Amino acid sequence: MKKSVRIFWRVFLIGFCALILLIALANFGVFGKMPSLKDLENPSMQQASEVYAADGTLMGKYYTENGNRSVVKYRDISKHVINALIATEDKRFYEHSGIDMKGTMRAVFLLGSKGGGSTITQQLALALFNQRASNKAIRVIQKLKEWIISIKLERNFTKEEILALYLNAVPFSDNVYGIRNASRTFFQKEPDQLNVEEAALLVGMINGPGVYNPRRYPKAAKDRRDLVINRMLENNSLSADEAAKAKAKPIDMSHYRKMDENTGYAPYFREILKDEIKTALKDVKKPNGDSYGIYEDGLKIYTTINPRMQEYAEEAVAAQLPVLQKALNQRPIVKNGTIWKDHPEVLEKAMKESDRWRNLEDEGLSDKEIKATFFQKVPMKIFAWNANREKDTVMTPYDSIKYHRQMIQSAFMVMDPVTGEVKAWVGGINFKTYKYDHANLKTKRQVGSSIKPYLYTQAIEERGFTPETICDNQPQFFEGNGWVPAGRKCIGPAQVTMAGALAHSLNCASAYIMKQVGPQPFADFLSRLNLPTKVDVVPSLALGACDLSLFEMMWGYSIFAGHGFSTKPYFISRIEDRNGNVIKRFDYSTNRKEAISEVTSYKMCQMMQGTVDVGTAAGLRARLGAAEMGGKTGTTNDNADAWFMGYTPQLLGGVWVGCDDRFIRNEGAGGFGGAAARPVWEAFFQKVYADKSLGIDRDAKFAKPAEMENEVNSADIDILVDSVPPAGQGDDYGVGNENDYNTKHDYIGPESKPLPPDENNPKPVKKDSAAIIKKEEAPIGAPVKDQKKGGGFLRRLFGKKDKNKN
């Protein structure tokens, strides 16, 4: 044998043994940890968690930048996507065992000029278990690991499962991950509805998500799409006529809509929900002992929110707030800016907490230089009460801070008073601009007269009062605390019935009742209602001189329509893992606690009907045509806060209106609870009663306890309510009529916007019958000729697992 031949075989054998040794060392984890068999059988990619409404509507998602994906099954992917992928990325996909030796040799000898040699399975291995290394030496080792993982993937999954895994894992343009999110983002449709040109466009992005972005580089994206179509033609996936028609169509981006935190239903609610989920899952572990992650573990969170009620609630807020804002903007001190004269520290703090300040600080500018930029006019978008909830303008950043802080905010919550299920949650006027939620447990404002029903309840429950009880309507002196109300005249006659005092929200009569109950017992009673906030023990509690959250007020008011039970609002029904296994279920019965007798709760329902009949919300019940309902207005000093709490036998709703800075407030009748907050509640119930699908009955009545059969009927309560002239400031008496609900401005729709249909609850759509995969057909994307049996040296080396799965 010639010496040169011996040298060749010696080099070949040494090289071959070295390759086998490298593969063996890589397989055993010498060059870095390899995925275990369990990891391979259960590949875990970051997956967005999804939030669902009570009817199964997808409300929104939680995700990181590379985790915004929704997993879709192979059967739910258009055959055009499969054909395009195989024709473009791996023509011999059905012939190899994870490694295409022909493609690999071609890539080596031609230095990649005719494309790389990575198969779909290798690309999947890289996507699931690695990140592409930039160092060439490390990349060689990484390539060996990809080969090993690819072969193991082929042993554990069918070809169809590998295709589905791949399409769920890869990135598309605009940081969209997974075929389902890409299909929704670019075309607003599910992946099984994609036609040829749409499938080709998406598959074309995979090779270069940035370069072939149709939104930024439409020509490059179209050229790439047409190349994919040509490859499909070459692979006999399309006829020449079909290919020509597909290439002739322009790229249509009219349906493009990328999801962000503002997209979907109830954005304020979903932001609060995040913390609740983290708390609920604190002690719930995954099978491997790790904690669940809301952004990456693909959880499914099912809530109690009713999408229709959510939309109606947002529409109600959007109908009333522009009216109030217009009135506030007409105040001279607001128009000329002098309202800020005594509060420069508020603007200074807002400047330093702004993104603009932080960004310029990161660039190295001094405080003086940064501050100067706030007084230079620049183009910007600002919030506005219009259909888009924004407008373009030119103003200084300093003026924009004042402009946005002068906006009146609102919070509105609706729940079932018996079960505690939250049906609608509005935390502010626009989540995109104002992230701060005003409806949650931690956001507290002075409640004013809306606290009075609690005091009257205690007087009935513990002091023997009845709606007919005569109360002194005069200032009351409390030892050590002085007069309540302090320095204020009393409205109305010197003596009134308890029912009349509540209906007209009379401060002096309420002070008299507080004297009979006592400040300390009343504070204890609020704790008995399970309200978490500890209030100061002062006589002025009778008039609402304390800060409570809307969430707490809803909790407390549940005792009336809830038959005496204090029921904590709740909004999660269950949480499932990515595989549909329930990992946490919520039971509302644990949130209920009997606080007062059913008799007392019914008497309060009777008395509080006086408010909505002839009191501070006069005519509300008649306008809505409801058989029975109760309510209470609330206003704080100088109209800084306006409240309306109201309920029917089936629903409880609470509204708060005010500015974040309490020195900014409406003055005059328009600022009282009866005029500012009640119209939101009324507008909502008008829509709810009109929507028969919701099952909210106008004729529903409060259940009367058996022991009260011979007592006064609710209709007789009006007899006990004296006619009282409009009250002064603080007695919470606004213009309680339909004129407060002014809809003359342009219609502004709800903030919530429906998302594309969810795979578990798809809306009826007409599917492209040609795009539906049929089981009896040959594998999609396979060559027309007979398939070769997958074999080869590497497959025999690693063995083959039986993959005939059902």
Image (cartoon, rainbow, N blue to C red):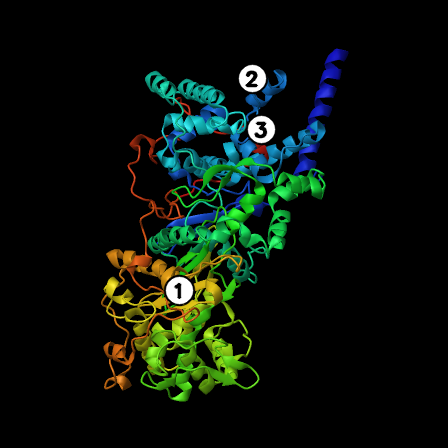
Q: Nearer the viewer, residue 535 or 24?
A: 535
**Residue at x-position 47% and y-position 52%:** 332
Q: Residue at x 55, y 44 (%)?
A: 399
Q: Earlier in the sequence, mark 1 or mark 2?
A: 2
Q: Which residue is mark 2?
A: 114
- Residue tagged by mark 1? 673
| For the residues bearing labels 2 and 3, Cβ distance under 8 angstroms | no
- When the figure is inspected, residue 359 is found, relative to residue 782, above or below; the finding is below
Identify the mark nearer the N-term, 2 or 3. 2
**Residue at mark 3:** 793
| Residue nearest the observer in this picture, 146 or 752 | 752
Is 513 located above or below residue 792 in the figure? below
Residue 24 image position (x, y, % from top left)? 67, 36
Name which residue type carries label 1: Gly
Quadrant in which the N terminus is drawn: top right
Circle 2 crowding by C-alpha within 10 Å: few under 14, some 14–19, many from 20: few
